[in-house]
């Protein structure tokens, strides 16, 4: 058999920059870890992702780099020239025509020559009126006649070029037949747009139109929507170009344009086209002014092109900013990026989009109703990162042994076994596990094992059983985290959030028999899932409602009456809010005696459940210190004053100590 590749030649081309085409596929975990750093510092997932995409990662420039290049392009476009080039050129040609005609008339002593000179002397200063008044003038100078015809031809081509890019070049030296074809094109285009507005347009009608007039549209749009988008953008740019001129320039140029269109018999068709385009795309920037700083005069078509580019730059800058609800890099048109910034910029955008896609495809991020959220998988990874940091701090201090191999070990064996569940730490019942595999596979598997060897019996996850023990010691943990505005002002929200994620990760992975509930509180308290916690920012509200938080903690403890109750409180302020009799939060500063009394009453209820309340203070305000000291005396709990960077170490070590047994007695650390 012949080799199908034999004789085939490989072809190589120049690599034009961008990401290395031979580099390994993007690992979304590294991007998630970078996002996790910001989340653990207190930011929301959306803000963290935006920061990553703005700043870039792993040698990849971010959106900020693209936006800097875009601003440079915008400045360069504004320096390209002035917008009144057509008006200046018309005035120059008009002056040349009049001067040449005067030179031709001067030697002639006849009354007719003097009458012609008088007509030239009384020409209006307004170039549009002067051009119109000279439309019936009988030129004696060939040079003057040529200059005047050049004005009319220039205006006709520039005006059409401001509506249809490239028309200035296409109509150079145009014949009457060419202009008649332009008129037919405009009539057919308006008819097609009107049919589309009535819902009667078909793709075949568009194909027929492009077959007849495709040379007028070098972009070669694929359908009517693309054609309308292109024409509407240019028409809007022309409107902004006119608005950017001075009042005098705008009036003079508008009159010249109107005269040119009337002379060509195109005024009504162009006016109808502008109205239909504006109706089809009212979202485009039809208003506004631009400040051009260049000195080179730009023709009407070129000036419109520059403003069209500036509009593209503004739109692209807004999309790259990603500062709107539901923003995603899929909103950014890669062709617009390449047109504005070049091929390498498009490749950078594609690489950033790949990061966004991979985080979603690999199950780390989800979008719900336009909101970006972390998946449980991402939360577990971030929680493990937070936990590793805490353990690293514990190891650095050299205090305590946190990684105990028999942590949460089972009690005495009962002689029975049960199916294995995730998180079980009991020894494996090997005999029962193998028996389950044999029974599942059936007699045929046993016979195969006899014929073919021991590979005939294969284990499944459902086959595993562990030896059963007496009930293990478990803990019911309630972690109360202050979400009030002061946490952000003091810069402690990030460490509180990181600590909560670390503790949840520790409990759920190493002590699955424990029941943990994270409760956030500001003016009200609420139970937070790990995913909600990771995506949470602080509350910009006044109020520290510890009473409501302790109420929810008591309900959690009541669900686990046989577990060791553990209540941990992270706060930076004394209670300033409580639930009134009507169920609404009542806030006051300084704290009302009623707020303090109801909070102490809730402390008493939690204490009667046998729970120790340990408080981790992130501030040393006298009011807070006095309150927590009195609370510790009532409850027998402890009060800690860690530095913010040590909060995770303190909380985790206290949890490990608490679950080994009660350590009552009010103490300060």
Image (cartoon, rainbow, N blue to C red):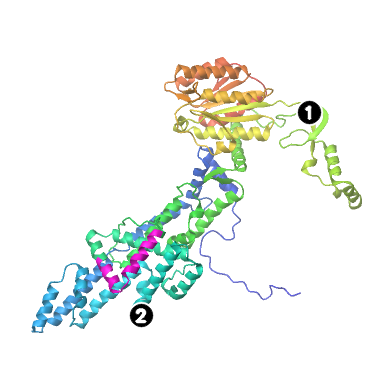
Give the residue at mark 2. 177
Is residue 666 among the parts visible in the rendering? no
2 vs 1, front mark: 2
The answer to whether residue 132 is magenta is: no
Q: Is residue 152 above or below residue 38?
A: below
- Image location (x, y in percent) of residue 558: 64, 23
Picture quadrant where residue 241 is located: bottom left
| Secondary structure, magenta segment, majority class | helix
- 131 vs 508, left or right, is left
- 477 vs 300, left or right, is right
Foreground pick, 129 / 607:
129
Q: SS class of the residue under badge 2?
A: helix
Task: Indicate the quadrant containing the N terminus: top left, top right, bottom left or bottom right.
Answer: bottom right
Foreground pick, 248 / 57:
248
The answer to whether residue 259 is magenta is: yes
Q: Residues within 10 Å of mark 1 (few under 14, many from 20)?
A: some
Q: Is residue 16 above or below residue 531?
A: below
Residue pictured at 19% horizontal, 73% vertical:
133
- Image location (x, y in percent) of residue 659: 66, 25
Q: Is residue 584 above or below residue 197?
A: above
Is residue 314 among the parts visible in the rendering? yes
Residue pictured at 53% horizontal, 22% vertical:
547
Task: Indicate the quadrant containing the C terminus: top left, top right, bottom left or bottom right.
Answer: top right
User: What residue range appears in magenta?
Assistant: 255-279
- Image location (x, y in percent) of residue 180: 35, 77
Residue pictured at 61% horizontal, 38% vertical:
384
- Image location (x, y in percent) of residue 282: 39, 56
Sequence-first disc among 2 and 1: 2
**Which circle marks residue 469 in the picture?**
1
The CA span between labels 2 and 1 is 99 Å
Q: SS class of the residue under badge 1?
A: strand
Q: Is residue 570 above or below residue 505?
A: above
């Amino acid at each position: 058999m012949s080799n199908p590749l034999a004789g085939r030649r490989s072809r190589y081309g120049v690599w034009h920059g961008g990401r290395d085409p031979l580099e390994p596929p993007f690992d979304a975990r590294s991007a998630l870890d970078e996002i996790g750093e910001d989340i653990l510092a207190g930011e929301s997932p959306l803000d963290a992702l935006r920061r990553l995409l703005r700043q870039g990662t792993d040698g990849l420039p971010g959106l900020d780099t693209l936006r800097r290049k875009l601003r440079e392009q915008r400045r360069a476009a504004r320096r390209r020239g002035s917008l009144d080039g057509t008006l200046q050129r018309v005035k120059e040609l008009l002056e040349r025509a009049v001067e040449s005609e005067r030179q031709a008339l001067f030697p002639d002593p006849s009354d007719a020559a003097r009458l012609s000179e008088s007509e030239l002397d009384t020409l209006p200063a307004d170039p549009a009126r002067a051009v119109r008044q000279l439309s019936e003038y009988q030129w004696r100078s060939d040079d003057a006649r040529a200059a005047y015809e050049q004005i009319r031809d220039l205006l006709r081509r520039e005006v059409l070029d401001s509506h249809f890019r490239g028309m200035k070049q296409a109509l150079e030296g145009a014949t009457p037949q060419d202009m008649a074809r332009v008129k037919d094109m405009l009539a057919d285009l308006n008819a097609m747009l009107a049919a589309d507005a009535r819902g009667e347009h078909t793709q075949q009608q568009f194909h027929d139109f492009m077959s007849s007039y495709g040379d007028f549209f070098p972009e070669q749009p694929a359908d009517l929507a693309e054609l309308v988008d292109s024409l509407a953008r240019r028409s809007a740019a022309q409107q902004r170009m006119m608005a950017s001129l001075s009042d005098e320039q705008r009036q003079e140029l508008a009159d010249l344009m109107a005269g040119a269109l009337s002379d060509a018999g195109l005024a009504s068709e162009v006016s109808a086209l502008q109205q239909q385009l504006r109706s089809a795309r009212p979202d485009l920037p039809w208003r506004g002014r631009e400040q051009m700083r260049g000195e080179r005069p730009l023709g009407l078509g070129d000036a419109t092109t520059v403003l069209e580019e500036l509009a593209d730059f503004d739109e692209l800058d807004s999309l790259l900013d990603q500062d709107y609800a539901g923003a995603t890099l899929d909103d950014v048109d890669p062709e617009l990026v390449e047109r504005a910034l070049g091929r390498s910029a498009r490749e950078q955008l594609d690489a950033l989009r790949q990061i966004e896609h991979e985080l979603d495809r690999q199950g780390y991020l989800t979008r719900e109703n336009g909101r970006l959220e972390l998946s449980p998988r991402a939360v577990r990874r971030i929680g493990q990162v937070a936990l590793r940091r805490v353990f690293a701090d514990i190891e650095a201090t050299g205090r305590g042994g946190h990684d105990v191999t028999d942590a949460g070990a089972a009690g005495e064996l009962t002689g029975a076994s049960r199916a294995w569940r995730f998180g079980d730490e009991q020894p494996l019942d090997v005999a029962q596990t193998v028996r389950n595999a044999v029974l599942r596979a059936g007699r045929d598997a046993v016979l195969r094992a006899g014929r073919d060897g021991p590979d005939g019996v294969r284990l499944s996850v459902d086959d595993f059983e562990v030896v059963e023990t007496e009930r293990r010691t478990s803990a019911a943990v309630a972690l109360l985290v202050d979400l009030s505005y002061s946490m952000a002002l003091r810069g402690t929200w990030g460490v509180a959030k990181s600590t909560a994620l670390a503790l949840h990760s520790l409990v759920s992975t190493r002590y699955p028999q424990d029941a943990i509930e994270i409760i956030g509180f500001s003016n009200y308290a609420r139970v937070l899932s790990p995913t909600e916690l990771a995506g949470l920012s602080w509350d910009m509200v006044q109020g520290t409602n510890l009473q409501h938080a302790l109420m929810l903690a008591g309900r959690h403890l009541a669900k686990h009456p046989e577990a060791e109750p553990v209540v941990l409180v992270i706060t930076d302020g004394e209670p300033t809010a409580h639930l009134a009799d009507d169920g609404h939060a009542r806030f006051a500063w300084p704290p009302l005696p009623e707020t303090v009394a109801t909070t102490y009453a809730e402390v008493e209820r939690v204490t009667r459940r046998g729970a120790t309340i340990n408080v981790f203070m992130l501030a040393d305000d006298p009011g807070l210190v006095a309150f927590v000291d009195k609370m510790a005396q009532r409850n027998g709990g402890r009060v800690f004053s860690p530095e913010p960077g040590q909060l995770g170490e303190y909380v985790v070590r206290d949890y490990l100590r608490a679950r080994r047994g009660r350590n009552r007695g009010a103490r300060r650390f």
